[in-house]
Image: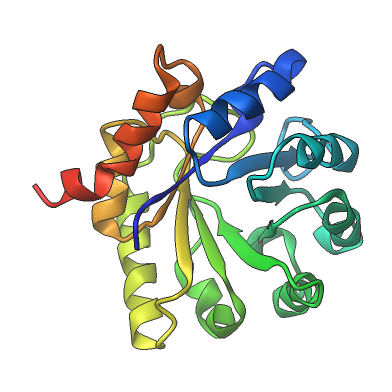
Amino acid sequence: MSTLIAPSILSADFANLGAALIALQEACCDWIHVDVMDGHFVPNLTIGPPVIQDLKKRSSLPLDVHLMITNPELYINDYVKAGASHITVHAEACIHLHAVIQQIKKHNIKAGVAINPATNPNVLRYVLNDLDLILVMSVNPGFGGQDFIHSSLEKIKHLRTMLKESNNEQVLISVDGGINNHTAALAVKAGANVLVSGSYLFKAVDLSHAIKTLKNSEQTSLN
């Protein structure tokens, strides 16, 4: 499948999110990645369901909601009602990961699990059959603008092999953190098929060109 681009609005101007959504849609991105942080699981605070509800009203693009929060099972219903198309929780934040995944899926939306840079990907081995998306954090979660952690590439390769061996190759592998015109090709070559990018896209002079550059990472990775 072609590489999907999910701009992270964490890097947008929060005073002009409506304009940012219009620009992203016109630039032909695939999803909108929404980082939700609670100040506990990660050392930062961002947005909650009311903002996501407003984003949903202003864009037809799928909202890829990434919950960087403790006890996500307490809030999943709120984010479903707000309009999330995908909900991704962190393996590190869930005591009963399988149950939380099932809680998401019962709402007929896509369920994902994120893993931090130091987390062994084998933590997902026994829930692969239940996942739609795996999110590999290629930076430590909590802040935008960090440098790509290159050891994430081996993790992506390992996950791609796990999915192939378990006949779950339909599960998407997304990578989030430090994605730019150089690291995108490395991630795609390793096996990622969704690229989450914030700073690179929102600092670009030409947003459409920057998104096209990331979309063409699949071809670049073959060279």
Quarter of the image with the N terminus is bottom left
x, y (%) of residue 212?
Answer: 34, 34
x, y (%) of residue 190?
Answer: 27, 57
Q: Quadrant of residue 44?
A: top right
x, y (%) of residue 50?
Answer: 90, 38
Q: How many marks?
A: 0
Q: Residue at x 57, y 34 (%)?
A: 25
Single out the residue that lies furthest toward the bottom: 166
Residue 199 left/right relative to 184: right
Single out the residue that lies furthest toward the left: 223
Residue 35 left/right relative to 129: right
Residues 47 and 59: in front is: 59
Q: Quadrant of residue 108?
A: bottom right
Residue 122 left/right relative to 13: left
x, y (%) of residue 14?
Answer: 73, 19
Q: Is residue 38 visible?
A: no
Q: Quadrant of residue 143?
A: top right
Q: Residue at x 48, y 72 (%)?
A: 171
Q: Is residue 194 above or below residue 111?
A: above
Residue 131 left/right relative to 181: right
Residues 69 and 105: in front is: 105
Q: Residue at x 54, y 73 (%)?
A: 123
Q: Is residue 163 visible?
A: yes
Q: Residue at x 34, y 42 (%)?
A: 215
Q: Is residue 100 above or below residue 137?
A: below
